[in-house]
Amino acid sequence: SLSELLKLEDISESVIPGGLGSSPLVGIIMGSQSDLPTMQAAVEIMKEFNIPYEVDIVSAHRTPDKLCSYSRSAASRGLQVIIAGAGGAAHLPGMVAAMTPLPVVGVPIKTSTLNGQDSLLSIVQMPRGIPVATVAIGNAMNAGLLAVRSLCGSRPELRQKMEAYQVEMKRKVDQMSESLTA
Ligand code: RP5
């Protein structure tokens, strides 16, 4: 199953104590199972920040009805942000964004033929009116972090966690430069 492939824990384990509840706040979707190795990085960020999330395969061209029902129900089901990864003619994130008022983060998946430049251009060049926040090719980690940041504004504990995450990155750089200059 998808859960086994992703080594997903029970959703109740991804809950901030006394905080965010247990229903998913972030929806992580992708066009194909072959996108999973890339999109796993977004899942890891959800786990690290204890954000309730859900993961599913939704293909714009192979499962168009599922695309519609997923996107149209997302907000009323309690999701606050959607991360959508797709490769090739990557219309998934834009189509999702067209059918939800929620913010959508697009992850261009690296392809074998054009190295993901096709995915990047498909996702980033959204016409006016329907935005997709596009991250770098294959950078599902940043998509996860952007989703977390979009939840920080009204959640002080989460904001503190993000600040601590950034402090930790700085500490690692400082440590490395100290070891280089020692
Ligand atoms: C898109 O086509 C997916 O997002 C994937 O990145 C790409 C290739 O899919 P498969 O070769 O796995 O069918 O739908």
Image (cartoon, rainbow, N blue to C red):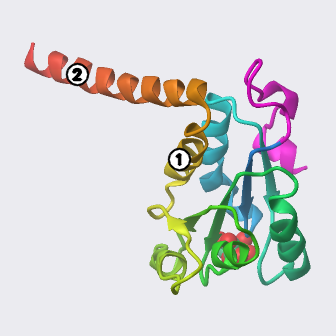
Q: Position of residue 52 (x, y in %)?
A: 76, 37
Q: Is residue 2 magenta?
A: yes
Q: Quadrant of residue 83?
A: bottom right
- Which circle's residue, 2 or 1, is located before the other in the chain? 1
Labels 2 & 1 near each other (Cβ < 8 A): no
Q: Quadrant of ligand 1?
A: bottom right
Give the amino acid at mark 1.
Met
Q: Which residue is mark 2?
A: 174
Q: Considering only vertical position in the picture, is 180 above or below 47?
A: above
Q: How many marks?
A: 2
- Residue that lies at the very extreme toward the front in this rendered image: 154
CA gap between label 2 and label 1 equals 22 Å
The residue lying at 77 percent from left, 27 percent from top is 15
Q: Position of residue 167 (x, y in %)?
A: 36, 24
Query: Seen in the image, is 72 located left or right of residue 166?
Result: right
Q: Position of residue 154 (x, y in %)?
A: 61, 37
Looking at the rendering, the stretch of residues picked out in magenta corresponds to 1-23
* 62 and 99: which is toward the camera: 99
Q: Is residue 49 magenta?
A: no
Q: Which residue is mark 1?
A: 141
Query: Seen in the image, is 96 located left or right of residue 2?
Result: left
Mark 2 beta carbon near ligand 1 (under 8 Å): no
* 182 and 59: which is toward the camera: 59
Magenta stretch: helix, strand or loop mostly:
loop
Q: Position of residue 67 (x, y in %)?
A: 83, 74
